[in-house]
Amino acid sequence: MQDNILVTKDVVKRFGGLVAVKKVSVEVKKGEIFGIIGPNGAGKTTFLNCVSGIYKPEEGEIIYKGESIKGLSSHILCKKGIARTFQIVRSFHKMTALDNVRVAVIFGSDQVHDPDQRARELLEFVNFPLPVDTLASNLNTVQLKYLELARALATDGELLLLDEVAAGLTPGELGDFINLIKKIRDSGVTVISIEHVMKFIMTICDRIAVIHYGEKIAEGTPEEIVANQLVMEAYLGKEHTAKK
């Protein structure tokens, strides 16, 4: 049985003369939580956008479950089992939380006979903190993050892409989200998480890749990444990491 759910090979994405992603290759195993970190502007979200079909890379290959998906649009990839969240949380503001998730259930799964019940189950699964008939326009950022996770899971995907889901959380909320992402993984969903909150990423990830100026400069376990000199230089600068 194939061990990798996602493989990227030398992915390149350009915007005019700017090379935002430079030959990034990763292998993500089924059932793991794979982290991607790097300084602001490193190319992390651009890389994720290539994987999720928002951008088409100019070079390289993207393989999901043994199939090339390079250049396929986001809605097709969603049907194939790739779901994602965004840095800026999005919702249908004039609809209730339940209806937001129900729309995703109807779009994402042809096998669900009761979308209303499935939407309720997903909101309960993610521990949505308010009544399900609450309008999305009345939710704060953290509550919207729970809603977005429920909507992403509603498509019955096997690979979940998270873009800074821990941003802006209090320490207590961070702990809740750490437990939730582990719960999602334990349900059979592989997770790729882009993040700046180091406590979050170092706690949940099995392996981490580091991107700097569009290039992958390191990959390994959280312990290996913390001890990597190139990673320290990327975050702190050589002048702060040079031996005295």
Image (cartoon, rainbow, N blue to C red):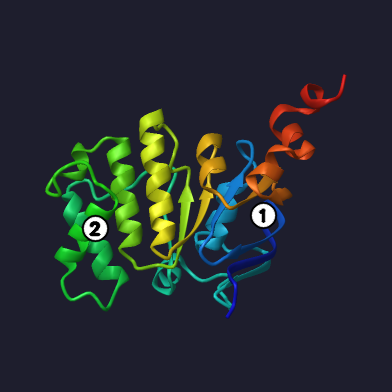
Q: Residue at x 69, y 32 (%)?
A: 235
In the visual, does 69 lie left or right of 176? Answer: right
Give the spatial CA distance, label 1 vs label 2.
34 Å
Q: Position of residue 100 (x, y in %)?
A: 22, 55
Q: Residue at x 57, y 41 (%)?
A: 202
Mark 1 secondary-structure assignment: strand
Type of amino acid under label 1:
Arg
- Mark 2 surroundings within 10 Å by alpha-carbon count, few (fewer than 14), some (14 through 19), many (20 or more): many
Residue at numbered disc 2 = 101
CB within 8 Å, label 1 to label 2:
no
Q: Residue at x 39, y 73 (%)?
A: 79
Q: Earlier in the sequence, mark 1 or mark 2?
A: 1
Q: Residue at x 36, y 44 (%)?
A: 89
Residue 10 shows in the view: yes
- Mark 1 surroundings within 10 Å by alpha-carbon count, few (fewer than 14), some (14 through 19), many (20 or more): some
Looking at the rendering, in which quadrant would you find the C terminus?
top right
Q: Position of residue 127 (x, y in %)?
A: 26, 47
In the visual, does 2 lie left or right of 166? Answer: right
1 or 2: mark nearer the eye: 2
Question: Residue 220 bears which disc, if any?
Answer: none
Q: Position of residue 181 (x, y in %)?
A: 42, 50
Q: Position of residue 36 (x, y in %)?
A: 60, 48
Residue 115 quadrant = bottom left
Type of amino acid under label 2:
Val
Residue furthest to the right in view is 244
Looking at the rendering, in which quadrant would you find the N terminus?
bottom right
Residue at numbered disc 1 = 14
Residue 85 shows in the view: no
**In the image, is residue 199 above or below residue 124?**
above
